[in-house]
Image (cartoon, grey):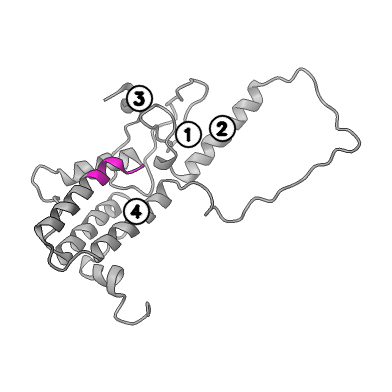
Amino acid sequence: MSTHEAQASPAKNLFPHQTPATGSSEELKDGMTKLPNGVILDKDGKPCRLCTSAASWRNLTKQAKAQGSTSTTPTTTSKPTSDSTTTSIPLPQSRDDCPPDVEALGRSTWTFLHSLSASYPVKASQEQQSEMRTFLKIFSRLYPCWVCADDFRNWMAEPSGRNEPRLSGRADFGTWMCEAHNEVNRKLGKKEFDCRFWEERWRTGWKNGRCD
């Protein structure tokens, strides 16, 4: 593990929708400012946007701007000319067009993974099982939030083998994916989902017809 990784390592959360704070004593690579709580460093020592909540990222941005304004002393002051104008451009009300934070990334990822299990064969062939096992291994290494990826990989590799992907068919795989998601819910203090109903939630729709 590199020095930057050691500095950035937070408490582990499997696909967290909110990452734990690294502590305000952490410093950026350039040593110019301290990190606000909740900001996670990437492996290169720089803040990782995809590992950090939107609120913590905004705090980091505000802090950087504030420090920049106080550290820069202008030598001259320009007076506006008579034809100068100030144009106010309203910010968009929605943040859907901004880069995702760790929470948005997590929600989208779980939608994809549950949909993947919902489309899995009722009874998977050996080839299909092998392909899915390979996908999960690659996914757990390439997921954009590296602390999340490490945690998911470590969870699947639990020594007892109880968290190994169950890939014999749709029912087993869908339940396994639901259990993985519930691991996150427990760590975040959220209500767990009743995995008996995973298929209604992600494949068929609820029996009361509200999804029709």
Q: Amino acid under label 4? A: Thr
Q: Is residue 112 left or right of residue 168?
A: right
Of residues 136 and 72, the one drawn nearer to the viewer in this rendering: 136
Q: Residue at x 46, y 48 (%)?
A: 100
Q: Using residue 166 as the reference point, say whether residue 182 is left or right of it.
A: right
Seen as rendered, the residue at the extreme front is 127
Q: Which mark is residue 109?
A: 4
Image depth: mark 3 or mark 4 in front: 4
Q: Earlier in the sequence, mark 3 or mark 1?
A: 3
| Callout 3 amino acid | His
Residue at x 19%, y 54% (from the top left corner): 132
Q: Which residue is mark 2?
A: 63
Instruction: Give above or below for 1 relative to 173.
Output: above
Give the residues in magenta: 138-144
Judge whether residue 166 can be spotted in this image.
no
Main SS of the magenta segment? helix
The answer to whether residue 91 is above or below residue 121 is: above
Dot 4 or dot 1, earlier in sequence: 1
Alpha-carbon distance for marks 2 and 4? 30 Å
Q: Quadrant of the image for the N terminus?
A: top left
Mark linked to residue 4: 3
**Is residue 82 something one can see in this rendering?**
yes
* C-alpha distance separating marks 3 and 1: 17 Å
**Percent position (x, y) of residue 91?**
65, 50
**Is label 4 in a helix, a strand or a loop?**
helix
